[in-house]
Every structure is written in C-alpha cells, then in structure tokens.
Image: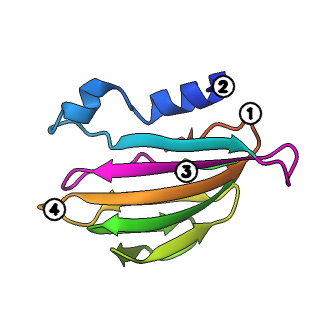
C-alpha cells in the first residue's frame, strides 16, 4: 500500500502515463519496483525504483532524506552532489548518496541515446522520495 508522502513524491517525479509517452517532455520516467518496511531496521523502509531518461533529459535539482544507491543499467548518467565534481557513470557502474545529499545534477549524458538507472533507497516510511531544491 502506497503512503501519501510516497504518492506526493511520485507526482514530483511525473510518473503519469502522459509523461511516459511524451518524448518531447522534460521529465524522466520513474517506476517503483518494490517498497518494503524493514523488519530488521524498525522505522525504516527500502524502496527500489528505475529512472528512465530520454536522450538529453535531466532531473530537477533535489535532495533525498534517505540514503540512495544508484546503478546504471544502460547508457550514461552524469551525477553531481553539492560540493563534489560531476561524474559520468557508464552502464555497470554505481554510486552512493548519503541521506540528505543535495543532488545538483542527474541527467542523461547522451543527447542521442536513452539511459536507465536502478535506484535502491533506505528511508523513514514518511519521507518523500525527493525534495526539490530552490534555485
């Protein structure tokens, strides 16, 4: 059962079918694969999702309240955490984002090929998946 904060966060990710089929749209496609409360870590839940980027697409600048680990399934993704250099990851590579990290850049590094991420997060059950950053 999805919680209201999760639904609100997913709306921020623009997961509606309209965006899933809108090739000219600016929004990536987010698909939640699993969401489970963690019995061995009371008060925490795990979430697994995919992020599909069309050529040239990017996410808004945001932060995650929970911890995130990302794995590039296909294509190349450029990612930058505040205070660090931007890094471009290729298919098969992964990275870690500590809870509260400000994710300044998350984008498809290619203007001609799609890209896909697999993301695993650990968070409080009421945490939003992402919080947009102002400016």
Residue 103 percent across, percent down from the top left: 53, 57
Q: Which mark is residue 113?
A: 4
Q: State if disc 2 and disc 1 touch (CB < 8 Å).
A: yes
Q: Is residue 58 visible?
A: no
Residue at (39%, 32%) from the top-left corner? Answer: 15
Secondary structure, mark 3, is: strand
Q: Which mark is residue 126?
A: 1
Task: Identify the residue at the far front of this view.
Answer: 39
Q: How is the image coloured?
A: rainbow
- Which-is-in-front pick, marks 2 and 4? 2
Disc on the earlier residue, 4 or 1: 4
Residue at (40%, 59%) from the top-left corner? Answer: 117
Disc on the earlier residue, 1 or 2: 2
Disc on the earlier residue, 4 or 3: 3
Q: CA distance from mark 2 to mark 4?
A: 34 Å
Residue under numbered circle 3: 48
Magenta region = 38-61
Disc on the earlier residue, 1 or 3: 3
The vertical placement of 30 against 56, above or below, is above
- Which-is-in-front pick, marks 1 and 2? 2
- Which-is-in-front pick, marks 1 and 3? 3
Residue 43 part of the magenta-drawn span: yes
Who is closer to the viewer here, 46 or 108? Answer: 46
Q: CA distance from mark 4 to mark 3?
A: 24 Å
Residue under numbered circle 2: 3
Disc on the earlier residue, 2 or 3: 2
Secondary structure, mark 1, is: loop
Q: Main secondary structure of the magenta part?
A: loop
Residue 16 part of the magenta-drawn span: no
């Amino acid at each position: 059962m999805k919680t209201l904060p999760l639904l609100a966060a997913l709306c921020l990710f623009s997961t509606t079918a309209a965006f899933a089929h809108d090739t000219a749209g600016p929004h990536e496609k987010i698909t939640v694969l699993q969401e489970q409360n963690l019995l061995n870590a009371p008060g925490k839940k795990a979430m697994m999702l995919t992020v599909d980027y069309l050529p040239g697409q990017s996410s808004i600048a945001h932060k995650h309240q929970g911890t995130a680990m990302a794995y590039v399934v296909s294509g190349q993704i450029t990612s930058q955490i505040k205070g660090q250099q931007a890094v471009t990851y290729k298919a098969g590579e992964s990275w870690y984002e500590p809870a509260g990290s400000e994710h300044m850049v998350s984008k498809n590094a290619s203007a001609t090929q799609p890209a896909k991420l697999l993301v695993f997060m650990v968070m409080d059950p009421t945490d939003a998946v992402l919080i947009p950053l102002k400016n």
